[in-house]
Amino acid sequence: MLEIDNLSHVYGGGTPNAHHAIEGLNLSVAAGELLCIVGPSGCGKSTLLRSIAGLIQPTGGQVRVEGNLVRQTPDNLAVVFQDYSRSLFPWMSVADNVALPLRRKNMDKKQRREAAAEALESVGLAGAGRKYPFQLSGGMQQRVAIARALAYRPTLLLMDEPFGSVDAQTREDLEDLVLKVRGHHQMTIVLITHDIDESVYVGDRVVVLSKAPAHVVGDLKVDLPAPRDQISTREHPDFVHLRAEVGRLVRGHATV
Amino acid sequence: MSTQTLPRPRPAASSRWYRRAAGALAFAALIELVSRTGLADREFLPPASEIVGRAVALLLDPAFRAHALTSLLAWAIGLCVAALLAVPLGLLLGSVPVIDAATRSVVEFLRPIPSVALIPLVALVIGTGLQHRITLVVYASLWPILYNTMYGLRGVDPLAKESLRAYGFGPLAVLLRVSLPSATPFITTGFRLAAGVALILTVSTEIVAGRGEGIGVFIFFAGIAVPARMTDILAGVFWVGLFGVAVNALLVAVERRAFRWHHARLGERS
């Protein structure tokens, strides 16, 4: 599904201030997988996501999505950014925000509207379509951004610290929402986070990145009983063990 | 989860209509007093009641109405043509840095020239008809709209643009679907400033032309009459001023209503 081969990216290359964000990163994600990527703050996670989405051209290496080399944004790809208040369009109603990307698909106005309503319902916002983003709470706005991505029916969904700007309770609700929707739609999801617990709770697999320049320092399979639950999953011995393991890797004290 | 209740932005004290009306009334009372007590020569400053009375009477005068309509036409056409030119031009200059850099020296040369100084020159080239006024109104109104469009584009959130790009939209779609709507509050402010400038240019051009129709022409003839018809001059000025205030208030109201999302956002940041 997603193949990243020896990816490197340098900002301001050739200058004394050149910043090596990523160096020699290899990663492969299978179709239908929910992969969490964790790493220390400022380690180049967002650069990696932007390279996958074709929003920036990496200075070295290759990204392939469904076998195709990424030169511009791949079809059937959606991105949910951390900052919902900036990524939603404030001049549009919630329904119009969700329906806008569907103009890229071969859908008429009625189909777009129906798809938007359906997506809003699936994130628990049925009936909020006529509101404007500024009339919703932060958690609800991020649900709108997720609905916008779901309505697009992506085969690859990228999420860049999607729950970094909401309170703890809302965060848990949104984590469960992601687990719920992945069951409904056959999607490959790559979720970037700096929250170690979140990565283990949500992911099928957790990849740990090093400090910048980022490369993969750990790749762990998460084999926790389904369905996952905010209380029982988090007290499961495997969860406790995995989060400790990921924590060590993030801090650079790996025991394995 | 609850819907945030947004406090309605309270208008600043200075913008509440009754305070402003009280200010205008006090000013009128002052003129009345100064004129009636003979502090100022009545020939030069008739009492406010006479000016307003004359202004109302002028409304019933078909000749004055023709003057007013001509001015209104020049103002409206000029302003609309300016907007139709300035917004696309602003989008072009604001999004293609190469063109912006190439034209900057020309723009920086033209912009500081007071439009009023061009009135005689344009009259020589194209005469003193309606096209004279429209040309000058277009020229003067272009700048506020152009600059505000470019300014608005500079403020467009890169993440908003990236959000649409991430769904595979190209640069033109991003410009029209994200940058343009995002800059609309600024463009509208530019249009409001331009509406005021256009009014100044309409009347000045008419006064300098001194023939044909227009409120400026009416004021001009009242001024060269012997003795000068001061009440007529001031009644004309009264209508121009009232029109300017009304247009401005209307556009401010439009901005408040249409761009609630913009003001909600500014409130959030401050």
Image: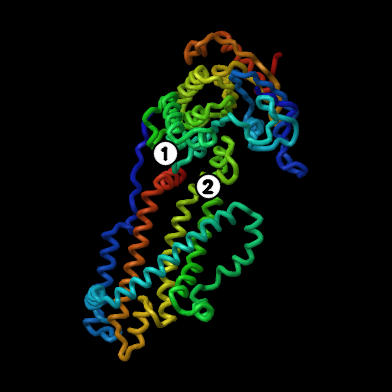
**Residue B176 — which label?**
2
Residue nearest the viewer, comparing B17 with B100 = B100
Whether marks 1 and 2 lie on the same chain: no
Q: Is residue A76 above or below residue B106?
A: above
State the image coordinates of residue B260 (x, y, percent, origin top left). Answer: 39, 46
Tag 1's secondary structure? loop
Position of the C terminus of chain A by quadrant: top right
Q: Furthest residue to the right?
A: A14
Foreground: disc 1 or disc 2: 2
**Residue A31 — which label?**
none
Name the amino acid, label 1. Ser
Q: Is residue A121 above or below residue B134?
A: above
User: What subunit carries mark 2?
Assistant: B
Residue A14 visible? The answer is yes
- Local crowd size for mark 1, using a 10 Å CA cut-off: few (<14), some (14–19), many (≥20): some
Q: Quadrant of residue A70?
A: top right
State the image coordinates of residue B261 (x, y, percent, origin top left). Answer: 42, 44
Position of the N terminus of chain A by quadrant: top right
Q: Residue at x 40, y 74 (%)?
A: B203
A169 left or right of A157 in image: left
Residue A193 visible? The answer is no
Name the amino acid, label 2. Leu
Residue nearest the viewer, comparing A222 with B211 = B211
Q: Residue at x 37, y 69 (%)?
A: B72
User: What subunit carries mark 1?
Assistant: A
Badges 1 and 2: C-beta atoms under 8 Å apart?
no
Q: Which residue is mark 1?
A: A93
Q: Residue at x 51, y 77 (%)?
A: B126
Q: Is residue B208 above or below residue A161?
A: below
B38 left or right of B75 in image: left
Applied colour scheme = rainbow
